[in-house]
Structure formats: structure tokens, C-alpha cells
Image: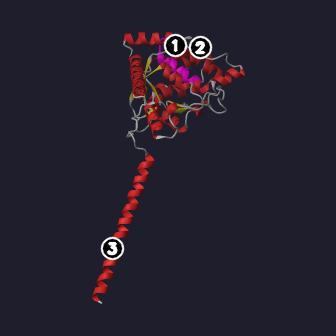
């Protein structure tokens, strides 16, 4: 009877609340020692005390897919179904980050789309670090806002090994009148100048991400500068030589010079064109050489035939 859903609990998404977690995962949770020793006979207050002791988030891990304590508490909340006010209090808790994440995950599983966007979007400015245990039993560091953002993905998504119910897009809820306007960013309405200034300040403070962005921008600007300088040098060379055919506007489309100039504009090596030589003349030379070779081969054959005939006549 310890694994049965509370008879006073209402159905969620047309099914038993515990069915929101897959059957195999539920059976793994029922068989683990944490569920049997720590989750038996818990109330909503007891779950809060257990959540304050959490040290990481995650789903099943290891070769035998052992469930995490975080997943066990989620299933226990689905079993007893706490009041909505208790869930909102868990999400608004600022002292314990794992308590907030637990409440957010439960609300994403059971809540209405309007409540999900209203209460979870407030936590996108929480940058505290979390320990995440992956399926391969490895550890990684994520932040609270990353975890919340994964819960707010459009459509169906999988978080902690649990398939979440489909979540409609925010724009659809705005058009239907459930939400008012677009989400207000914590950064506010920043123009390009203020964002560049903020980025420079973060880079001066030693922020790794800001330094990486500035480094990438420096590489892109140097590449574009080298391409523009190469094109300018080519144009100036053509102008000094008095050759106006170097400009693509004055070249015949499809010619060798035209494509050579296009390669220069794209930052590629220009084609090598020798003066006084073009492609039609080369083709004519090749054709003439082939015909001469054939003629020589034919003449040699005729001379051999004549020699054979002369020898026969001499023998006769």
C-alpha cells in the first residue's frame, strides 16, 4: 500500500499522477533503498525537509539505472499531491536552490501552461550552480536558470530522464489571452552601445565568457580586414597599370578575368593569366598538335606500305 496514490488526489492529464513517470523508472524507484527507508509515510512538510538535504539533481544513473534521490522525491510528491500553494512556496524559496528546482520540476509535470510560465520565468535570473548527475554516472555543473530553461522548452522534452507533457508556445498563450505580452528580460531594453559597454566592463573584470566573445570578434574583424585589404591592393594595382578590366563592372561576364576578379573579391587566390594568351588560342594549338600527330602517323604508315611494295617488285 505504500506505493499507491492518495485516493483524494485528482487525475492529471487524464491519468494517475504517478503514471507521469515511466513504468520501468517507477519500479526502479520502488525497489531502491532510499524510497523504502526515507520516503515512507512522508507528508508535504517532511518532503520539504528531505529536499533541503538534497546535494544534486538528476534522473537514473549507472549501469543498473539506479534512481536519484531527486527523482524519488518527485514521485513521492506525485503520490501525495501537495496543494498548489505549497508548490508555489517551494519555487519562491531563495535559501535552498534544490528546493526551488524540485518545486519547479513538479509544477512542470502537473501544472497548467499559464502557471508554468508565470512562476518559472521568474527564476531565469537565478544563476546559482547545481550538481547534475548524468546517465553515465558522471558529474557536471549547471545553473538554476539552465535547468529552468530546459523545463520551458516548447513541445515535448526530456529532463532528468522523464518525458515532460507537451507545453504550448508562449506566443500562443499570449494570443489566447492567458498571458500579457512577451516576457520582460532582466537586462531590460539595452541598445547596441550599452551592450558593448557592458561587454567591455565584464571583460575587464575577467569574465571568461566575455573574454571569449571579444577574442572571437577580434578574429572575425582581422579576417574581414585582410580580405578588404587584398581587394583594395588588387584594385589599386589594376588602376596603376591602367588596366580597367580589373574592375568587375567593366569585365565581360563569364570571361577568365571576370572570375579572377570575383575570386579576389571573395578573398581567394586570383587565377593566373599570362598576357597575350587566352583559352581559344590554347585550344587551337591543342587541335593542331593532335592533327599533326595523326598526319605524321598516317604518313609513316604510307611510307612503310610503299617500301613493302617496292621490295615485292624487286623480288619478282
C-alpha separation, residue under disc 2 versus residue under disc 1: 18 Å
Mark 3, other Cα within 10 Å: few <14 / some 14–19 / many ≥20: few
Indicate the secondary structure of the residue bearing disc 1: helix
| Residue 7 location (% of width, % of height) | 64, 28
For the view shown, which residue lies furthest in the bottom direction?
316
**Vertically, is 200 above or below 56?**
above
Q: Nearer the viewer, residue 299 or 225?
A: 299
Q: How many marks?
A: 3
Q: Which residue is mark 2?
A: 184
Q: Which residues are magenta?
A: 93-107
**Vertically, is 296 above or below 56?**
below
Q: Residue at x 48, y 19 (%)?
A: 144
Residue 104 painted magenta: yes
| Quadrant, the N terminus | top right
Q: Earlier in the sequence, mark 3 or mark 1?
A: 1
C-alpha separation, residue under disc 3 versus residue under disc 1: 86 Å
Q: Mark number for residue 272?
A: none
Q: Residue at x 56, y 27 (%)?
A: 153
Indicate the secondary structure of the residue bearing disc 3: helix
Q: Residue at x 68, y 20 (%)?
A: 174
Q: Which residue is mark 3?
A: 303
Could you tell whether 114 is left or right of 255 in the image?
Answer: right
For the view shown, which residue lies furthest in the right direction?
176
Q: Which residue is mark 1?
A: 192
Mark 1, other Cα within 10 Å: few <14 / some 14–19 / many ≥20: few
Amino acid at each position: 500500500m505504500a506505493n499507491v496514490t492518495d485516493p483524494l488526489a485528482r487525475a492529471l492529464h487524464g491519468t494517475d499522477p504517478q503514471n507521469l513517470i515511466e513504468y520501468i523508472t517507477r519500479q526502479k524507484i520502488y525497489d531502491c533503498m532510499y524510497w523504502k527507508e526515507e520516503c515512507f509515510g512522508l507528508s508535504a512538510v517532511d518532503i520539504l525537509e528531505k529536499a533541503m538535504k538534497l546535494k544534486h539533481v538528476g534522473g537514473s544513473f549507472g549501469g543498473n539505472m539506479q534512481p536519484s534521490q531527486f527523482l524519488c522525491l518527485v514521485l513521492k510528491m506525485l503520490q501525495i499531491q501537495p496543494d498548489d500553494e505549497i508548490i508555489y512556496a517551494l519555487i519562491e524559496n531563495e535559501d535552498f536552490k534544490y528546493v526551488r528546482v524540485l518545486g519547479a520540476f513538479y509544477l512542470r509535470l502537473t501544472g497548467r501552461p499559464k502557471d508554468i510560465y508565470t512562476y518559472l520565468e521568474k527564476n531565469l535570473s537565478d544563476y546559482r550552480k547545481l550538481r547534475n548527475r548524468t546517465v553515465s554516472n558522471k558529474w557536471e555543473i549547471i545553473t538554476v536558470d539552465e535547468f529552468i530553461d530546459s523545463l520551458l522548452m516548447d513541445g515535448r522534452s526530456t529532463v532528468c530522464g522523464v518525458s515532460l507533457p507537451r507545453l504550448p508556445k508562449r506566443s500562443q498563450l499570449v494570443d489566447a489571452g492567458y498571458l500579457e505580452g512577451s516576457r520582460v528580460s532582466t537586462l531590460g531594453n539595452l541598445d547596441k552601445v550599452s551592450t558593448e559597454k557592458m561587454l567591455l566592463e565584464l571583460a575587464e573584470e575577467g569574465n571568461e565568457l566575455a573574454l571569449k566573445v571579444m577574442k572571437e570578434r577580434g578574429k572575425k574583424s582581422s579576417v574581414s580586414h585582410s580580405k578588404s585589404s587584398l581587394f583594395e591592393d588588387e584594385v589599386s594595382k589594376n588602376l596603376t597599370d591602367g588596366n580597367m578590366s580589373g574592375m568587375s563592372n567593366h569585365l565581360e561576364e563569364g570571361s577568365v578575368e571576370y572570375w579572377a576578379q570575383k575570386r579576389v573579391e571573395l578573398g581567394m587566390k586570383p587565377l593566373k593569366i599570362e598576357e597575350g594568351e587566352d583559352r581559344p588560342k590554347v585550344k587551337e594549338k591543342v587541335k593542331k598538335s593532335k592533327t599533326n600527330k595523326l598526319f605524321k602517323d598516317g604518313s609513316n604508315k604510307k611510307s612503310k606500305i610503299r617500301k613493302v611494295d617496292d621490295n615485292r617488285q624487286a623480288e619478282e
